[in-house]
Image (cartoon, rainbow, N blue to C red):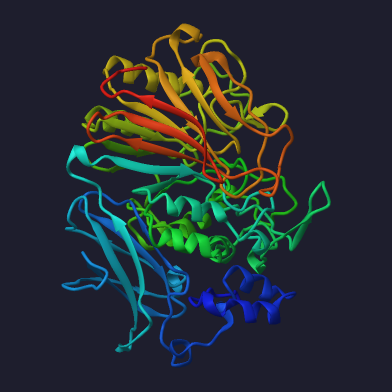
Amino acid sequence: MSHPVPGSSPASAPARRSVLRGSLAASAALALGGAGLAAPAFALSGRPRAAWGVQTGDVTASSGLVWVRSDRPARMIVETSATESFRRARRHHGPLLGAGTDFTGTTALRGLPAGEQIHYRVTLADPDDPRRTGEPVTGTFRTAPDRRRDGVRFLWSGDVAGQGWGINPDVGGFRAYDEMRRLDPDFFLCSGDAIYADGVIEPSVTLPDGRVWRNVTTPEKAKVAETLAEYRGNFRYNLLDHNIRAFNARVPSIVQWDDHEVRNNWYPGQILDDPRYAEKDVDVLAARAARAFGEYTPVSTLHVPGGHGGRVHRVVRYGPLLDVFVLDMRSYRNPNSPNRQADDTTGILGAEQLAWLKRELAASTAVWKVLAADMPIGLVVPDGAADFEAIAQGDPGAPLGRELQIAELLRFVKHRRITGTLWLTADVHHTSAQHYAPERAAFGDFAPFWEFVTGPLAAGAFPASALDGTFGPDRVFVRAPERGNLSPMESPSYFGEVDIDGHSGDLTVRLRAEGGKVLFSKVLRPGRVGQ
């Protein structure tokens, strides 16, 4: 069965919904406003279409990345302008989009003005006849400021289409994205689990109270992803949602990955004992997933088409107030285990990434240094009965296992007197704020710091994780359900907001719930080693 393609004419939705409801094609059409099954003039004339929308990523004061997907071979052309009328537009020549990258492509924009609203439009041209072009798709974003007084405000969260909770047309799809778009942030930090490649989406799920959750379905979401085509299909699934496409067109992203981009709790070298998988070698699966991630995500460090030879960890410098250190706690970790070894140089980051992080933190001149982590530090995340998935393992004593690497990093930050660090993450499907302090800790050679957790955006909600006392966490706020895997009908989406004032330099973190409610707020002062 062919994959449904989103359209761009929401006004035509009601009539088509009444006709198409009930079939697999109708299920996708509902999420797309129904227009995906229309045959506009551009499609009939054989011109390339950019029906999956546009995205921007890794925006700095002078650069950014623009992403698009075509429905056939095409040349990507991007124009940028200071105005929506595209007067004095500047043209950026992009790549030739073909089957080798699933018709996706990213164009780097350079030499942009700092702190300005950039309007862009993407045109796809027939590679054999450049005069035959598709209908342009437009978007906008703000470049990072080059002046401190301009301030910075961004959002973060993760966990999309997990635990079987997919795009539900009855509730308007992934509505949290519409709420985040209306907040008009400078950018969005996706803290991992942007897809659930191991998460099957059934047509419907009956809730404990008898209500029925209906999902848009696609062939690629009917089983766990193993092939490159199936991983690609997982990324396309999320783009069926009109809220995500509208969000992507207005808000640039900084994207990292965690486990569900490949499969639950994966680590390098793992051999699966899971009957759902014909391919048991996780390294093979991870390579396919990384290629799809590189094709469908505008990430600056994945230099080669398909993501080969690239990396996820990087620093995105967002003006004088902020550096975002994007960590990769997947690609270099050691196997999940009881995590109580007394010597551990690999840890969760790997020795090379840890050395890189130390260098970049020491060199940073930004007022605030956000450590964007895939997973929390002091929250216990089990993997089965005896192993552990994250850093903590429930032993409140001196650092062991992966905690040793984090202790080394925290010690480095303290002794180099690096100011303005805070940790942001998602992963555990509830929202909380933890303050870590040496006077409460078994390991005391570090400066106090904060860790803020949020999510899920569109997945099952779960009870609060237990705390590990090694680094002295105090959970000053938590919002979590009492039972596991609550649907988005039963528990709201969670996301966080970071607002850095350009005059005082104060950083305010707000933990938000869908519906406009601020659950918790904390103001941090600049220039302090710990607070």
Q: Give how far across and how far down residue 292 sits, in percent.
A: 49, 60
Q: Split into 4 quadrants, where in the image is the N terminus?
A: bottom right
Which residue: 33% across, 84% down?
127
Q: Nearer the viewer, residue 248 or 63?
A: 248
Which residue: 37% across, 51% down?
310
Question: Is residue 237 found left or right of 324 in the rendered image?
Answer: right
Q: Is residue 311 visible?
A: no
Q: Split into 4 quadrants, where in the image is the C terminus?
A: top left
Q: Give how far across and how far down residue 167 sits, in percent.
A: 63, 60
Which residue: 49% across, 16% down?
471
Note whether 525 is above or below 275 in the view shown. above
Residue at the far bottom in the pictured view:
45
Q: Is residue 10 visible?
A: yes
Q: Give how far across and how far down residue 355 sits, in percent.
A: 33, 30
Which residue: 38% across, 43% down?
154
Q: Give how far across and how far down residue 333 sits, in percent.
A: 50, 35
Name the quadrant containing residue 41.
bottom left
Name the quadrant containing residue 294.
bottom left
Residue at the far front in the pictured view:
516
Note whether 76 is above or below 378 in the view shown. below
Q: Nearer the viewer, residue 125 or 488?
A: 488
Q: Nearer the viewer, residue 125 or 85?
A: 85
